[in-house]
Image (spheres, helix red, strand yellow):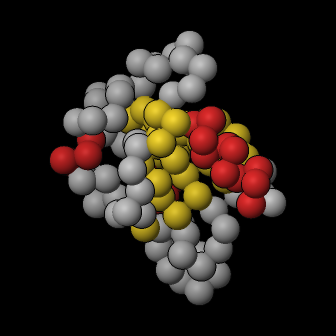
Amino acid sequence: MSKLIPQTLRSNIPDLCETEGSTNPLCHVKLFTPDSNWTWFIIEFSKADAKTCYGYVQGMDSELGYFTLEELESIHGPLGLAIERDISFTPTPLAQIKKDEHESR
């Protein structure tokens, strides 16, 4: 089981495809690399395999897509730091995340 998303948070994240058709889904968890500019916002989490996520990824470009917790746990930034969960993040609508991203560029 991944340590990136504690069980207490998993139950609040919609299952895969539950927010399909939503124009402004809620981002429930924020993961980031402390030594680079990559960030993952989790919108949905697979209850079946407990590893597949759907969310918004900010990096060289920004896009919605699927990723697994296994993939994220294998990533280390340029200084060797692992991905972390932003423990101060509160669920935020995707439109607000995109707006904040646009304003910071």
Residue 105 rendering spot, x and y as whole percentages: 80, 60
Question: Residue 69: where, in percent of width, then height?
Answer: 42, 51
- Given residues 68 and 45, the one toward you in this image is 45
What is the number of callouts on the image? Answer: 0
The answer, for residue 52, to whether it is visible in the render is no
| Residue 37 visible | yes
Q: Which residue is depicted at the point 29% across and 30% down?
A: 47
Q: Residue furthest left?
A: 8
* Placement of 79 over or under 75, stated as above or below: below
The residue lying at 50 percent from left, 80 percent from top is: 81
Q: Quadrant of residue 104?
A: bottom right
Tell whether 5 sits left or right of 79. left
**Residue 16 at x, y percent in the picture:** 42, 25
Percent from the top left, x then y, of residue 91? 41, 43
Specify whether 69 is left or right of 34: left
Considering every residue shown, the one lying at the far top of the view is 21
Residue 45, located in which quarter of the rendered image? top left
Query: In terms of image quadrants, where is residue 97?
Result: top right
Q: Residue at x 55, y 69 (%)?
A: 33
At horizontal 70% and vertical 52% (from top left) the residue drawn is 101
